[in-house]
Image: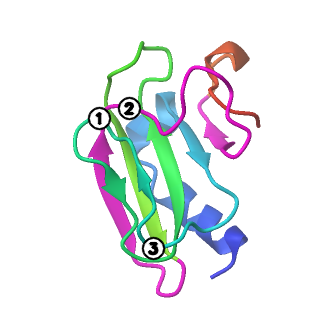
């Protein structure tokens, strides 16, 4: 699977609510099996080599609000969605993650990573 196909799959998995008010972030390259992310509870762990997206459902809210991770198996394209409350990055802008979707009305100041 290419990064372009993974991106298309991520965008196709956004719910109407996420499209209306959310922001989707993604890593440009797949992560190794076993890599984990903090989801606010049990860590989110990639079971296989996977492309990873973080969907912030309420980008204008403070920390600890509804979100989810999408893990896309880099070989089979199987998608796993994992509910979360926290992003994989801290308050400083993280240069690994990229904004791949932003709902109209979400200002630049609310983005946690570069576009």
SS for callout 2? loop
Look at the numbered discs 3 and 2 and tell me whether their residues touch, using CB distance below 8 Å.
Answer: no
Disc 2 or 1, which lies upstream in sequence?
A: 1
In the picture, which quadrant includes the N terminus?
Answer: bottom right
Q: Which mark is residue 33?
A: 3
Magenta highlight range = 74-103
Residue closest to the far left: 41
The residue that appears at 34% across and 53% down in the rendered structure is 44
- The residues tagged by marks 3 and 2 sit, at their Cα atoms, a distance apart of 21 Å
Q: Position of residue 32 (x, y in %)?
A: 53, 71
Cβ–Cβ under 8 Å for marks 3 and 1: no
Above or below, 1 against 46 in this view is below
- The crowding category of the residue bearing disc 2, from other C-alpha atoms within 10 Å (few below 14, some 14 to 19, many at least 20), is many
Q: Quadrant of residue 71?
A: bottom left
Q: Residue at x 63, y 42 (%)?
A: 101
Q: Is residue 64 magenta?
A: no
Mostly what secondary structure, the magenta segment?
A: loop
The mark that comes first in sequence, 3 or 2, is 3
* Image coordinates for residue 82, horizontal then vertical, percent: 30, 53
Q: Is residue 58 above or below residue 49?
A: above
For the C terminus, the quadrant is top right
Query: Which residue is pictured at 59% across the width and 44% down the height?
Result: 25
Q: Label 3: how many residues lie within 10 Å, few (<14), some (14-19) or many (20+)?
A: few
Count of number-bearing discs: 3
- Where disc 1 sits, the SS reads loop
Residue 78 lies in the magenta-colored region: yes
Q: Which residue is mark 1?
A: 40
Mark 2 and mark 1 residues within 8 Å of each other at the beta carbon: yes
Residue designated by label 2: 86
The residue tagged with tag 3: helix, strand or loop? loop
Closer to us: mark 3 or mark 2? 3
């Amino acid at each position: 699977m290419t990064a372009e196909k993974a991106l298309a799959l991520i965008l196709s998995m956004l719910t109407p609510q996420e499209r209306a008010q959310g922001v989707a972030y993604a890593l440009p390259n797949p992560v190794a099996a076993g890599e984990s992310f903090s989801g606010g509870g049990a860590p989110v762990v990639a079971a296989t080599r996977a492309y990873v997206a973080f969907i912030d459902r309420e980008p204008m809210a403070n920390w600890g609000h509804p979100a989810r991770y999408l893990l896309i198996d880099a070989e089979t394209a199987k998608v796993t969605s994992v509910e979360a409350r926290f992003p994989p990055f801290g308050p400083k802008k993280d240069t690994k993650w990229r904004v791949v979707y932003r709902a109209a009305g979400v200002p630049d100041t609310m983005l946690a990573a570069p576009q």
